[in-house]
């Protein structure tokens, strides 16, 4: 009671000082004031080598402000309202005064200087996924499980006929496969000239369905998600090539087993060869194979990689614009994700980046200097900075600031880039930078386009103190980085309820050097309510190298929890942390970690909120689950040890589980099986669900969700 009174007095003190306290409407993306508290921004793009700014009304040259074309002008030329915003005026061709828009059932290209529509193509009725090729102006699209192509002249061509049209999804064409693992985000891939289309065919007829209940109808109905669980039968994928001119399909004669993985499809510059990274189901042997697209026959195996745990190809080849026989390949073969120059003809590889850091993204090439532009965390594991690597000389140059987290887009020839970054103290900075070397010096900053002010500070909100530091992992050697958010009006002589926010799994991190150290809005809200928050990236999370990630292999959750307990040990050493009021919260893998921590260390955490948790890895999907755990048949002890079902009896504190009632990722069976185990053991978790929602909540549901989470901590942790 005393604590709640103290928090109320703190809020009154803030208001008295003229500072507003953040609300969920301010900090959640579904909130009604969220947009107003985002840092100032400019929307940019490229027109060949000309940087552009797009606004709601028009497209302008970024440096001069000269208007190229307006929404009003395009609508006037077309004779109807086809463009609603300057952001959807696509400039597809360098130096040509042409914009592309969609409207009234057509895809249009409009010449604003001539004042006329120069090309149009009907948008096919019932089209789902659409993949437009700018060069040929051919359109690939899916409809009810099948794949089609609409030519530039508007003729509809049928690529497949045996796709499932009954909603069963037994056989689907042109869709993302392997459940979006291995860098896969789509199912169609145009050749450089846009006259051939590589595509996936996925046969899921042998995969068990998971029942999802739809309660939106008068009588609830059931749909079946194709969900291959670890150790069970998986789907089978084929790769086809559709020739638009010949109007025929050639199937690749893929090597390996029927349930192998085929990813990172890459066309050769001449469009005669398709390169496929092929991975066995055990995910410990990867091959790069070249196929003749005219016959579908394997030409040769160019490269292979093995590892006793797993290999994870995430990126396709990038051919050098000045040499068709060489391509850049990314690999963790030396322990960190680095760039390798691959000779396509001989298979010889030459490592080009070195060190205990990760290449995070390749942006493209500077053709003039024969260099590659990329992002990496070479300066600090929490940063992501821009670099230019000369591929003919051993020289690497930093581009832009040596702090923060950067994202960039390149001009057509790669001689300039638009750099967008934030740092712990800079909400957003946009800069135009040259990538051309200048006599051994760093390339020049051409112009600062925008440096945004802190909108929270500008609008008079109370901002908590946010810091980042490091502690040692449970191995006593590895540095782990954390973010700490102290309560608004922090007083070091007082003690505070403390919440550990956790994710902890692969392919994600929580702490980096962007604005406010990557603070989540909910954390700022809870700090305004008098909580201290602590967020630690344990071993097993991303961008720290292969050994850091693979320490969890075959026993997910164990090493991660040990590291989180080191964080708890650090918290308990701080005089202002109330060790008797520790809470924990996380979603997805973080929900797994939250439930695991509450049940494995029942005397440490008083309250937990677990969202969309994995409870037993044998209920999770083949691709992800078997990579990190092998199959239940191969690793029965690991699956048993990492399951939370046997730990349900240990629950002491207050645990609320929240999940989307129609979650297709961590299916409801996880949560429901845990509830049954708790009921059998006599322990008492709480439950809340969002009917109709999937793995995450969006829009107003996101505000509702975080109010629910916050209330639970208010009720049981304060």
Image (cartoon, grey):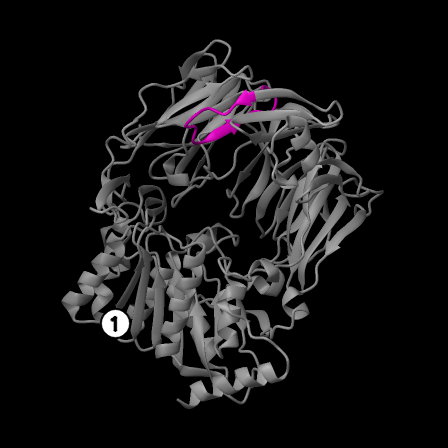
Nearest to the observer: residue 166 or residue 680: 166
Q: Which residue is mark 1?
A: 651
Inspect this view and state whether residue 580 appears. yes
Q: Dot 1, crowdedness within 10 Å: few (<14), some or many (≥20)?
A: many
Q: Quadrant of residue 228?
A: top left
Q: Residue at x 47, y 68 (%)?
A: 476
Check the picture and name the quadrant holding the N terminus: bottom left
Q: Position of residue 114 (x, y in %)?
A: 74, 22
Numbered disc total = 1
Q: Position of residue 146 (x, y in %)?
A: 37, 24
Q: Is residue 637 left or right of residue 378?
A: left
Disc 1 secondary structure class: loop
Residue 12 coordinates in the image, percent (x, y): 55, 85
Residue drawn at (35%, 75%) of the image: 605
Indicate whether 441 appears above or below 518. Answer: above
Instruction: Examine the image and state in which quarter residue 679 appears.
Output: bottom left
Q: Nearer the viewer, residue 55 or 632?
A: 55
Q: Reply yes or no: does residue 638 show up in magenta.
A: no
Task: Based on the picture, tell me whether residue 130 belongs to the magenta stretch.
Answer: yes
In which quadrant is the C terminus drawn?
bottom left
Range drawn in magenta: 121-137
Residue furthest top in the image: 246
Residue 600, visible in the rendered structure: no
Image location (x, y in percent) of residue 707:
41, 68
Q: Main secondary structure of the magenta part?
A: loop
714 and 332: which one is in front? 714
Q: Residue at x 55, y 39 (%)?
A: 330
């Amino acid at each position: 009671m005393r604590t709640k009174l103290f928090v109320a007095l703190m809020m009154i003190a803030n208001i008295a000082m003229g500072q507003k306290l953040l609300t969920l409407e301010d900090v959640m993306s579904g909130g009604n004031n969220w947009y107003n508290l985002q840092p100032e921004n400019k929307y940019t793009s490229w027109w060949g080598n000309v940087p552009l700014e797009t606004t709601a009304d028009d497209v302008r040259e970024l440096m001069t402000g000269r208007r190229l074309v307006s929404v009003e002008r395009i609508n006037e030329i077309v004779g109807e309202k086809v463009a609603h915003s300057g952001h959807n005026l696509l400039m597809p061709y360098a130096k040509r005064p042409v914009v592309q828009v969609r409207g009234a059932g057509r895809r249009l290209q409009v010449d604003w200087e001539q004042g006329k529509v120069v090309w149009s193509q009907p948008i096919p009725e019932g089209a789902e996924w659409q993949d437009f090729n700018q060069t040929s102006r051919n359109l690939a699209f899916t409809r009810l499980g099948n794949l089609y192509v609409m030519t530039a002249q508007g003729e509809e061509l049928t690529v497949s006929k045996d796709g499932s049209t009954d909603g069963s999804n037994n056989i689907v064409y042109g869709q993302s496969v392997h459940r979006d693992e291995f860098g896969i985000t789509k199912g169609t891939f145009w050749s450089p000239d846009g006259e051939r289309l590589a595509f996936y065919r996925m046969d899921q007829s042998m995969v068990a369905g998971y029942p999802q209940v739809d309660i939106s109808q008068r009588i609830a109905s059931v749909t079946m998600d194709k969900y291959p669980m670890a150790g069970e039968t998986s789907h089978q994928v084929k790769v086809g090539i559709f020739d638009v001119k010949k109007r025929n399909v050639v199937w690749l004669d893929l090597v390996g087993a029927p349930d192998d993985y085929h990813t990172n499809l890459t066309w050769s510059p001449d469009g005669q060869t398709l390169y496929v990274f092929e991975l066995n189901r055990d995910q410990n042997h990867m091959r790069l194979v070249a196929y003749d697209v005219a016959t579908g026959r394997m030409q040769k195996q160019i490269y292979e990689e093995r590892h006793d745990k797993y290999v994870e190809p995430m990126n396709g080849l990038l051919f050098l614009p000045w040499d068709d026989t060489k391509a850049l390949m990314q690999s963790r073969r030396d322990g960190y994700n680095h760039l390798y120059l691959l000779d396509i003809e001989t298979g010889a590889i030459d490592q080009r980046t070195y060190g205990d850091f990760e290449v995070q993204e390749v942006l493209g090439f500077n053709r003039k200097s024969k260099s590659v532009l990329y992002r990496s965390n070479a300066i600090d594991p929490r940063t992501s900075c821009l670099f230019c690597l000369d591929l003919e000389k051993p020289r690497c140059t930093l581009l832009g600031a040596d702090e923060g987290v950067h994202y960039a887009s390149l001009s057509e020839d790669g001689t300039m880039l638009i750099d967008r970054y934030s740092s712990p103290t800079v909400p957003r900075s946009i800069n135009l930078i040259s990538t051309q070397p200048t006599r051994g010096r760093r390339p020049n900053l051409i112009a600062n386009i925008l440096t945004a002010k802190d909108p929270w500070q500008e609008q008079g909100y109370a901002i908590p103190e946010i810091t980042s530091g490091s502690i040692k992992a449970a191995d006593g050697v590895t540095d782990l980085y954390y973010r700490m958010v102290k309560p608004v009006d922090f007083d070091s002589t007082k003690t505070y309820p403390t919440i550990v926010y956790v994710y902890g799994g692969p392919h994600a991190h929580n702490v980096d050097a962007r604005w406010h150290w990557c603070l989540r809005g909910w954390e700022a809200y809870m700090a305004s309510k008098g909580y201290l928050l602590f967020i630690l990236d344990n071993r097993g999370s991303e961008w720290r190298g292969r050994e850091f990630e693979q320490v969890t292999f075959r026993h997910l959750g164990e090493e991660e929890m040990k590291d989180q307990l080191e964080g708890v040990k650090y918290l308990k050493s701080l005089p202002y942390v109330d060790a008797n009021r520790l809470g924990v919260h996380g979603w997805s893998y973080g929900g797994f970690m939250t439930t695991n921590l509450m049940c494995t260390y029942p005397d440490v955490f008083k309250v937990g909120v677990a969202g969309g948790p994995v409870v037993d890895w044998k209920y999770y999907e083949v691709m992800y689950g078997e990579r990190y755990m092998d199959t239940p048949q191969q690793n029965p002890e690991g699956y048993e040890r990492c399951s939370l079902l046997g730990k349900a009896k240990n629950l002491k504190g207050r645990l609320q589980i929240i999940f989307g009632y129609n979650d297709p990722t961590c299916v409801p069976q996880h949560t429901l099986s845990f509830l049954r185990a708790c009921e059998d053991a006599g322990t008492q978790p709480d439950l809340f669900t969002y009917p109709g929602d999937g793995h995450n909540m969006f829009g107003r549901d996101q505000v509702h969700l975080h109010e629910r989470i916050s209330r639970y901590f208010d009720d049981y942790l304060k």
